Image (cartoon, rainbow, N blue to C red):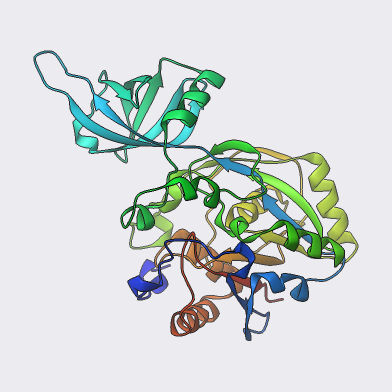
Amino acid sequence: MDVSLFDFDLPEGLIALRPARPRDSARLMVVHEDGRIDHAHVRDLPDYLARGDVLVANDTKVIAARLRGTRLARAGGVTAKIEVTLHKRVAPDRFWAFARPARRLIPGDHLRLGETIDATVAARGEAGEVELSFALAGAHLDAAIAREGETPLPPYIAGKRKADAADVADYQTLFAKDPGSVAAPTAGLHFTPDLLVRLETAGVARALVRLHVGAGTFLPVSAADTAAHKMHSEWATLSGETAAQLNAVHGAGGRIVAVGTTSLRTLESAAGADGVLNPFTGETDIFITPGYAFRAVDVLLTNFHLPRSTLFMLVSAFSGLAVMKRAYEEAIRAHYRFYSYGDACLLFRPR
């Protein structure tokens, strides 16, 4: 499909720089199966779900993936300031990372990140990213990154303000358990303990999957046609126990409600052609565009996404391109807040 079909104009003032407080006070646009739109708040979620439904959230935890430091002097040369954002772990002591300025790095360069982390540039990637080999490994490296790193706010926030102490908590969901993401699964940011209690009281069950979000989620689609776009891959897992739970929900007539596109991509990666979910662990590069036949997910809670992004393509596949363009036009007219710290929409998949 022509990528320009997924373009729209977004006023810069609608990009949220801080989350709503409390989290579940964020606005919620509800897009029904027939395209009808309701305006509500995330705290109203129990009113739109039914007893027997199951909410599926991503329990990945964001790491302090942004590191600032120095490229040590090459023979006869000078040092240079450098910033790296880790985006994918490939070994206990190795990460792929995006660097700024990337042109200053070549294989063999030695880096000092923060005060204590030493790394060597092992390779350059096709997209300009670098593979870093660290002097530390495993839990020792994890602890050093947590100590020296910063919250990796998305570019559209980081370009307007620096990460601060509030972001350490704000950019983490209450489902977060397993460190590994360099971006938050942002639909999960809207939940509060009180909202979870009210959902449970309403008979809505809860399940967890895991997808470690990579910085590739923010990469623009540079191709003119979606068929030419190479999707980044991310590590995901769905346990056998959770797969059985979700299959039972469908068997009893309940709906699977994905909290965010990361949960949806995990579930759709694990689903067979018959819609049955199977245990899954591994890399997924599933790229969902209009025409995709959804197998597992019935309802999607998600934030408002960037124009021409793979995520706007995904929601357009879920609810229909014309419906989502109209919904986004309404969101802009009604001054909904966009992107990671913004408001949410609840999408019911047309039958």
Is residue 322 shown above or below 43?
below
**Residue 278: quadrant of the picture:** top right
**Residue 303: quadrant of the picture:** bottom right
Question: Is any part of residue 166 visible from this angle?
Answer: yes
Is residue 300 shown above or below 94?
below
Residue plotted at (67% across, 80% down): 32
Residue plotted at (85% across, 59% down): 249
**Quadrant (top left/top right/bottom left/bottom right) for the N terminus:** bottom left
Image-based side of 245 in relation to 146, left or right: right
Residue plotted at (34% across, 58% down): 223
Question: What percent of the width, then of the height, locates residue 5?
Answer: 40, 73
Image-based side of 147 in relation to 108, left or right: right
**Quadrant (top left/top right/bottom left/bottom right) for the C terminus:** bottom right
Query: Could you tell me how many numbered marks the image carries?
Result: 0
The foreground one among 243 and 197 is 197
Question: Is any part of residue 220 visible from this angle?
Answer: no
Question: What percent of the width, then of the height, locates residue 136?
Answer: 46, 16
Residue plotted at (77% across, 56% down): 274
Question: What percent of the width, then of the height, locates residue 333?
Answer: 44, 85
Image-based side of 51 in relation to 17, left or right: right
The foreground one among 122 and 67 is 67
The foreground one among 188 and 293 is 188
Question: What percent of the width, then of the height, locates residue 349?
Answer: 67, 72
Name the outermost residue toward the left: 76
**Residue 101: quadrant of the picture:** top left
Is residue 115 shown above or below 40?
above
The foreground one among 168 and 39 is 168
Is residue 307 shown above or below 146?
below
